[in-house]
Image (cartoon, grey):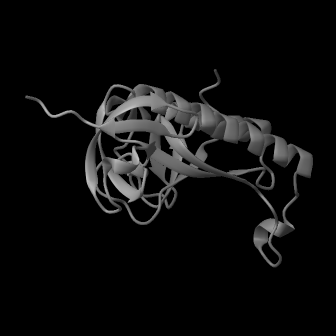
Amino acid sequence: RNRTATPAVFTTHGASMGPGVPPASSVYSREHNEFLSRDGGEQSPMRGDMVLANNDIVFGADLIAGFPTETDAMFENSRALVDDCGLTHLHVFPYSPRPMTPAAKMPQLDRNIIKARAAVLRHAGETALARFLDGEVGRNRAVLIEKTGLGRTEQFALVNLPETAGQPGDIVETEIVKAGSDRLTGRPARRAA
């Protein structure tokens, strides 16, 4: 695999959350497997392999497919970012020009290419989420009940629960018993005797 493709943009929400988390606007370098500050500052200590080493942390990303002048290599770098950084939750959207913006004045990609690239990225995200969910089966997780029969783990995974598991706002220790394509199924964990 070509490890020298153009760096992909990796954006987190808000400012850096501390050591090991990239600042709000970073560039991920596949060549060096690390995050670099877009403003020319110091390199972030976060590396993709560090993310993968701690399986209780999951990351998501917003990815734009088909930004003006995006080359095949740039797109492949964005696609590979999902695996290289162990991303789990993706928000993928096709680029669409906004009037009066600098990007709207740049050479645009064909809409069919943009849609196809977005579909590829969405599929990569669905595959990554399914892989993560499969790895949760058999684990116990603290689940915040959002509404009767539905909650979320600390890793933001949706969990279907029995309606009797708790009330909205309760945190329930849950045994994960099944993984679906976009959510888990759990039951209140049995207490040790």
* Residue lying furthest front: 164
x and y percentages locating residue 94 in the rendered image: 76, 54
Q: Is residue 79 above or below residue 19?
A: above
x and y percentages locating residue 175 in the rendered image: 31, 34
Horizontally, is 70 left or right of 144 in the view?
right
Q: Which residue is at the front of the view, 155 or 42?
A: 155
**Residue at screen point 47% across, 48% down:** 36
The N terminus sits in image quarter: top right
Horizontally, is 144 left or right of 112 in the view?
left
**Residue at screen point 90% across, 52% down:** 111
Task: Mark yes or no: residue 56 visible.
Answer: no
**Residue at screen point 70% across, 34% down:** 76
**Residue at screen point 31% across, 30% down:** 139
Q: Is residue 59 above or below residue 171?
A: above
Q: Which residue is at the front of the view, 173 or 13?
A: 173
* Residue lying furthest top: 1
x and y percentages locating residue 69 in the rendered image: 81, 51
- Total number of numbered discs in the rendering: 0
x and y percentages locating residue 92 in the rendered image: 67, 50
The C terminus sits in image quarter: top left
Q: Is residue 113 above or below residue 108?
A: above
